């Protein structure tokens, strides 16, 4: 039995296999429609979520399985003080696999140590968001045809953005990756990721404040929202929230084949006028999220079709 706590839990070869399976699911939905019949996914979401929770549920329903769970800590026994380890022990009696989102870093890791079923980390605080990273990798590979030799711009909240941290960890394993880190000083990528990941592995990167300066040199732009829930005071959030707004005028500076990704939800960092640009790939990205989670569930449950 294995769990998914970090995108690094799968080797590059295993990731390729997972993405190949997701691509097969995309074109052969009917083939997998009953693969998880009689199986149940538990969604333990201690923090609000739309896409991550619904895409896990859609993935299991598309495979013919069942879903049970809760969508906030208030509607679970966590409100009464039940520990994560007790919750997962109990959930192991009801379900075959579990997806957990928690505001505290490391909570899913605690869960997997006490679980008798596979646990998927569906986001833990500002730490990791591996299924979003798998979604991002599948999206990039499907759109660009490769995961190597690219210049990738990461824009917005690079300090608290767990999707950014996870994506960097995953992409540095591929040759020829370069990063342009676009953020205000207050939301810079944490120094431990710069030194322990980028510098240590000699991955080239540059830090810029202006989005306009970065756009012409990018193969891919990964936008993120400034996360209100990670700020301790409202003033800082209000000052930062509109620091970057990608609009049609800025898109004119970008190469014709530069796709725009966003883990969503967006607030106003991407203007709605960009939605009609053929390079806007964030809604397609959400669709790929269902396919990769279907592939992940099958892989962790060791079901072959």
Image: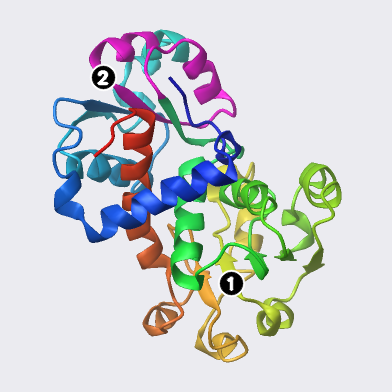
Query: Which is nearer the eye, 280 or 174?
Result: 174
Residue 18 sits above or below residue 180 on the image? above
Which mark sits nearer the N-terminus, 2 or 1? Answer: 2
- Circles 2 and 1 in contact, beta carbons < 8 Å: no
Residue 187 image offset from top left, x and y in percent: 72, 55
Taking the magenta stretch, the answer to whether it contains residue 156 is no
Residue 217 image offset from top left, x and y in percent: 70, 81
Residue 264 image offset from top left, x and y in percent: 44, 58
Residue 235 falls left or right of residue 266 = right
Residue 42 image offset from top left, x and y in percent: 29, 26
Query: Which is nearer the eye, 276 or 71?
Result: 276
Within 10 Å of disc 2 (Cα), the crowding (few <14, some 14-19, many 20+) is many
Question: Residue at label 1?
Answer: 220
Within 10 Å of disc 1 (Cα), the crowding (few <14, some 14-19, many 20+) is many
Residue 32 falls left or right of residue 274 = left
Q: Residue at x 37, y 83 (%)?
A: 276
Q: Residue at x 43, y 71 (%)?
A: 281
Image quadrant for the N terminus? top left
Query: Which is nearer the eye, 162 or 201?
Result: 201
CA distance for labels 2 and 1: 39 Å
Query: Which is nearer the eye, 228 or 56?
Result: 56
Count of marks placed on residues = 2
Question: Residue at label 2?
Answer: 95
Disc sitting over residue 42 in the figure = none
The stretch of residues the image draws in magenta is 89-118
Residue 81 sits above or below residue 143 on the image? above
Residue 176 falls left or right of residue 103 = right
Q: Residue at x 63, y 62 (%)?
A: 156
SS under mark 2: loop
Image quadrant for the C terminus? top left
């Amino acid at each position: 039995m294995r769990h998914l706590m970090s995108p690094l839990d799968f080797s590059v070869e295993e990731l390729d296999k997972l993405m190949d399976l997701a691509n097969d699911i995309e074109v052969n939905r009917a083939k997998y429609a009953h693969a998880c019949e009689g199986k149940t996914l538990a969604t333990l979401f201690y923090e609000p979520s739309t896409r991550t929770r619904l895409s896990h549920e859609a993935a299991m329903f598309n495979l013919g399985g069942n879903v049970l769970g809760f969508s906030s800590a208030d509607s679970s026994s966590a409100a009464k003080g039940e520990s994560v380890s007790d919750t997962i022990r109990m959930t192991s009696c009801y379900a075959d696999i579990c997806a957990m989102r928690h505001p505290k870093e490391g909570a899913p890791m605690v869960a997997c140590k006490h679980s008798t079923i596979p646990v998927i980390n569906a986001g833990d605080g500002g730490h990791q968001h591996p299924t979003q990273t798998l979604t991002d990798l599948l999206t990039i590979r499907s759109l660009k045809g490769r995961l190597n030799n690219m210049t990738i711009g990461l824009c917005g909240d690079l300090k608290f953005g767990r999707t950014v941290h996870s994506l960097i960890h995953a992409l540095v394993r591929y040759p020829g990756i370069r990063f342009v880190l676009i953020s205000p000083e207050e939301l810079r990528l944490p120094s431990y990721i710069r030194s322990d990941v980028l510098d240590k592995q000699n991955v080239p990167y540059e830090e810029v404040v202006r989005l306009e300066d970065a756009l012409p040199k990018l193969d891919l732009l990964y936008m993120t929202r400034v996360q209100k829930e990670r700020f301790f005071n409202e003033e800082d959030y209000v000052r930062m929230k509109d620091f970057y707004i990608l609009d049609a005028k800025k898109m004119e500076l970008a190469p014709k084949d530069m796709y725009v990704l966003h883990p969503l939800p967006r607030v106003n960092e991407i203007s709605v006028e960009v939605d009609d640009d053929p390079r806007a790939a964030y809604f397609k990205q959400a669709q790929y999220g269902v396919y990769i989670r279907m592939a992940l569930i099958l892989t962790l449950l060791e079901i072959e079709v």
